[in-house]
Amino acid sequence: MESWLASTSLKSSFYLGLLCLQVCLQPVLTKAFLKPGIKKSTLVVTAELLKIVICLLQLSFVGELRKEYNKWSFHDSLITAALPAFIYAVQNIAIWIAYQNTSGLTFNIVNQTKIIFTAVFLYLVLNKQRSKTQVVALFILSLSATIVSLPVDDWSSFTSKDDSHVPVETHYYGILVALFGSLLSGLAATLCQYSLQGRGRNSKVFTIELAVFGTAAIAASSYVTTGEFPLDYSDWDLNTLVPVIGQAAGGYITGEVTKRSGGIKKRLCSF
């Protein structure tokens, strides 16, 4: 397995395939195993903690843990990881809400607008320009997302069976939250690509930093607003771990894909 993954291009394709699988399965797992009343901030924090564990185990497995620890700098970490971590923390909460207020089909199609926001922010922040063909493709993608956002009664012949059970108000709410999450994701992906490719950060270390800062931001926000930390497991059971582990694995894979392939390819693999 290690020799097969030795090639950079093969590694990139391998992680792109894994991310594609995770993106397709995550909404299904969330609807199947997650109870509606579970606290979203607890889900996000738990997934972030699992990301840290996964990355530490991987660093240890490949023998990079001590080397990365010795050269780690809090100053560099604060500059490159703090802002995207905060953005991702908010986006993760939006994702959990969108998962539960749209069907898996609707969420995944609207979620593709992340590539539009990513392309826009890559141009604005990193001056990454797109060809005319790519711009047309992005327009078509935007149009498809708009069509799928229509109420069920207006396109009943094209919708999935799952959407027929989603009230119109809930449908619109889920769409808006998903779009907001996509915008945040595009901005954060641009900042992450700059850190991983422009500054040469280790993807596993960077994922740990994002998880630590993100967890701290959510914990602080929860304590200020409610006086409690976001770790309420009273409604959890073993089934709850299934989508949480899936989300954590997706976070690790996303870091690898961004490092090796960039933000646009990361978005394309989720079609």
Image (tube, helix red, strand yellow):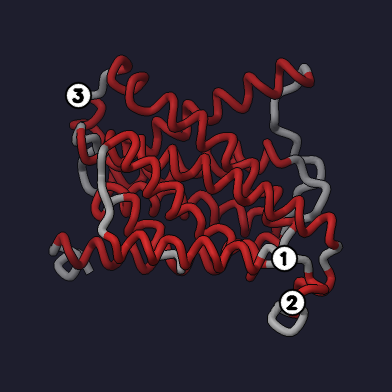
**Alpha-carbon neighbours of circle 1 within 10 Å: few (<14), some, or many (≥20)?**
some
Can residue 56 be seen in the rendering of this structure? no
CB under 8 Å between discs 1 and 3: no
**Alpha-carbon neighbours of circle 3 within 10 Å: few (<14), some, or many (≥20)?**
few
Query: Quick one: label 1 or label 3, which is nearer the N terminus?
Result: 3
Give the CA separation, mark 1 to mark 3.
Answer: 51 Å
Q: Position of residue 244 (x, y in %)?
A: 60, 51
Left or right placement of residue 74 versus residue 138 in this view: left
**Alpha-carbon neighbours of circle 2 within 10 Å: few (<14), some, or many (≥20)?**
few
Left or right placement of residue 67 versus residue 28 in this view: left
Seen from the viewer's position, the closer of residues 61 and 50 is: 50
Amino acid at pointer 1? Leu
Q: Nearer the viewer, mark 1 or mark 3?
A: 1
Q: Position of residue 200 (x, y in %)?
A: 19, 36
Give the CA separation, mark 3 to mark 2.
Answer: 56 Å
Give the CA separation, mark 2 to mark 1.
Answer: 7 Å
Give the tally of numbered discs: 3
Amino acid at pointer 3? Lys
Q: Residue at x 44, y 26 (%)?
A: 83
Secondary structure beneath label 2: loop
CB under 8 Å between discs 2 and 1: yes
Q: Is residue 152 above or below residue 249?
A: below
Q: Which residue is mark 3?
A: 71
Q: Which residue is mark 1?
A: 150
Can residue 60 be seen in the rendering of this structure? yes
Q: Which residue is mark 2?
A: 155
Amino acid at pointer 2? Trp
